[in-house]
Image (cartoon, rainbow, N blue to C red):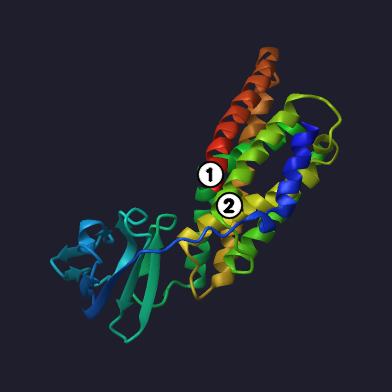
Amino acid sequence: MRQLLSWLLALVATLPAALPAFGHEMSMAEMQLRETRRGEFLWQWGAGEKRPIAQDLTPVWPQACAAEATVLRCGEAGLAGTLSVKGVGERYSAAVVRVFWLDGQTRVYTLTKAQPSVQLYGAADDPRGMGEVASAYTLLGVEHILGGIDHLLFVIGLLFLVGFQRRLVWTITAFTAAHSLTLASSALGWLTLRSAPVEATIALSIVLVAGEALHKRDTLARRWPAMVAFLFGLVHGLGFAGALQEIGLPEHHLLIALLTFNVGVEIGQLMTVGACWCLWRLGSRWPAARRLRTVLLYMIGSIAAYWSWLRVAAVLA
C-alpha cells in the first residue's frame, strides 16, 4: 500500500507534465439563429460536407420554444432555458451555435459531447441580478456534490480513515481548501487539464483511501491524513471545475457565481458528513453494525477500482 501511495502522490505531482495532447481533426457543425422580432428566430444549419447536418444533429429547444421548419417561436420570454444538440460527439465533434440577437449583439456557443447543452436567458447577456445568481449557483453546487458519487465516496473514505475525532476537522478543511483552489483556477482559465486523467486520478484516490482505512498500519495516510486530503483535493477540484464549465459562468457576477457554487459544494459535503455522523451514532449502539465497516470499505474500493480501470483505459485510448 505504501508503494501505491507513493505512486499516486507522484501522479498528482506530475499530472500537468504527463498529459499528452492527443490532436485530431475536429469536424464542426454550425447553426445560425437570427432574432427577427422579440421571441421569434429564423434558424438553419450550415452546409454539411457530405450530407445535410440535420441527418446527424437534432436541436433540443428550450421548453417554451416551438420550431416550425426554419422558424423558432419562443413567446415573450424569448430564447430562455436549456438548448442542447442530440448527436454531438458522434459524426461531428462540436456544434457551434451562433445567435444574432434583436439588439444587434452576437453570441457564439460551442456544444460538445462533454458539454452538450448551454443555458440561455432570453438576451445576449445574463440579466439575472446578484442575489438570483448567488441562489442559483449555491443550489447547483449542492446538487453537483450530492450527485457526484465519486466525490462523496472519497469524503466517506476519509471518514472511515480518520473517524469522528478532532483530526477530521483539519482533514476536511484541507480537502476543502485544495479543491476550492483548483476549482477557482480552472474556472477562471488559469489552469487547464484534460478531463480523462483527472477523472482517473479521482477514482484512484478513492481506492487509496479505502485501502488505507481497511488496515491499522502506521502509514503516511494515517499519520498525515490532511496532507493526503489536500493533495487529492487539488484533483477533485478540477473535477468540480469540469462540471462548472458545463453549467457555464455568467459574464456579470462571475466571482459571485464561482464563490456560491463552491459554497454549495461545501454545504453538500457537510450534509454528507452530518448524515454519516448520524448513522455512526445509531450504529454505535449495536456491536454487530461494526462488522459493516469492512464490507462497506470493500464495496467502496471495488467500485472505485472498476472506475479506475475504465478511466485509465480512456486515458490510454
Q: Is residue 296 above or below residue 223?
A: above
Residue 63 location (% of width, % of height): 26, 58
Is disc 1 in contact with disc 2, using a CB cutoff of under 8 Å?
yes
Element under disc 1: loop
Which amino acid lies under the numbered mark 2 shown in the image of this protein? Gly
| Res 168 visible | no
Label 2: how many Cα within 10 Å (few below 14, some 14–19, many 20+): many
Residue 191 in the image: above or below residue 275 = below
* Residue under numbered circle 1: 148
What's the residue at 70%, 21% (across, down)?
A: 284
Residue 122 as seen in the image, left or right of residue 163: left
Spot occupied by residue 134 in the image (x, y as percentages of width and height) = 53, 64
Depth check: give the residue in front, 143 or 71.
71
Query: Residue 264: x and y, percent?
Result: 57, 54
Q: CA distance from mark 1 to mark 2?
A: 10 Å
The amino acid sitting under disc 1 is Gly
**Residue 212 seen:** yes
Residue assigned mark 2: 239
Q: Is residue 81 rendered to the left or right of residue 261?
A: left
